[in-house]
Image (cartoon, coloured by chain):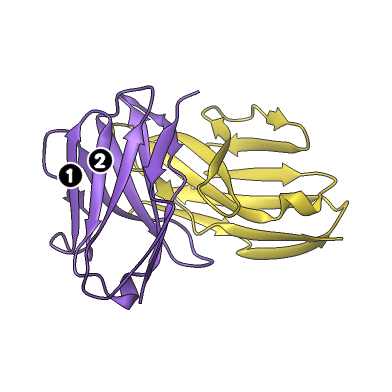
Amino acid sequence: EDKVVQSPLSLVVHEGDTVTLNCSYEVTNFRSLLWYKQEKKAPTFLFMLTSSGIEKKSGRLSSILDKKELFSILNITATQTGDSAIYLCAVVRRGNTPLVFGKGTRLSVIA
Amino acid sequence: GAVVSQHPSWVICKSGTSVKIECRSLDFQATTMFWYRQFPKQSLMLMATSNEGSKATYEQGVEKDKFLINHASLTLSTLTVTSAHPEDSSFYICSASWTGYNEKLFFGSGTQLSVL
């Protein structure tokens, strides 16, 4: 059965800290990996990763994929209270099949 | 960018009534839409895959007679929670993808359902 495992499930840090969120996967017909941020409503797209070793960056957020070891990490530097959210990792499989989501990491950034 | 509109944003209903949630792709045609359910502090749980012009594919454990899905056009899918009960209270989110590009998955804003 295809699965995506995120760790940690929850994390509390202070403003200014750097955090690393982990996502490992075991899926057949892997195509790409997505990261989403979910605050109060629907998830918002952060990154799509298809190739190993190529870092994607957006401001203080960055992510990288390792297709050999089957994992991805999401880094957030200089965290702010606005980064508090659930971060979801999802894997896209070939064909028009549903995403496989991890359980998410709940990040709380305290001032 | 592509937008998916979901309506209503929240609904409160009495136990035993039915509630319809709409999911529209506003500027693209979505042959496939997905319906998710999310309990507080938990991840998205896929309920069903809705394909335009055909029957929805339900995930194991999801009652198809309870959660009726209709995908009558390339821009609209509806989820009807029939004879709602308090345990159906949850956050429901739809998503839609461009044909053949599952990475281009856009989410609706979600519907918070509270059944009294």
Say which quadrant the N terminus of chain A sits in.
Answer: bottom left
Label 2 Cα crowd, 10 Å radius (few <14 / some 14-19 / many 20+)? many
CB atoms of marks 1 and 2 within 8 Å: yes
Q: Any idea which chain is the purple one in this picture? A: B
Give the camera-side residue of A46 and B64. Answer: B64
Q: Is residue B11 above or below residue B29?
A: below
Q: How far across and how far down the image is residue B77, in percent? A: 25, 40
Question: Left of B66 or right of it: where is A89?
Answer: right
Chain letter of disc 2 in the image: B
Mark 1 falls on what kind of element? strand
Identified at 17% across, 44% down, the residue is B70
Percent across and percent down for residue B92 are 38, 56
Q: Residue at x 35, y 22 (%)?
A: B28
Answer with the quarter of the image where residue A28 lies.
top left
Numbered circle sitting on residue B77: 2
Instruction: Give the image location of residue A52, x and y in percent.
Output: 58, 30
Tell which of B1 and A72 is nearer to you: B1
Look at the image and tell me in which quarter the C terminus of chain A lies: bottom right
Task: For label 1, count other residues whose C-alpha is less than 10 Å away and answer few (under 14), some (14-19) or many (20+).
Answer: some
Taking the image as shown, residue A101 lies to the left or right of residue A63, namely left
In percent of the image, x 50 and y 38: which residue is there? A33
Q: Which residue is mark 1?
A: B70
Marks 1 and 2, the one that precedes in the sequence? 1
Callout 1: chain:
B
Colour in which the image shows chain A: yellow
Residue at horizontal 33 percent and vertical 35 percent from the top: B24
- Asked whether residue A97 is in view, the answer is no
Dot 1 amino acid type: Asn
In the image, A16 versus B4, the foreground residue is B4
Residue A19 is left or right of residue B35, and the answer is right
- Inspect the image, locate mark 2, and give the three-letter code of the amino acid beneath it: Ser
Whether residue B116 is situated above or below residue B52 in the rendered picture: below
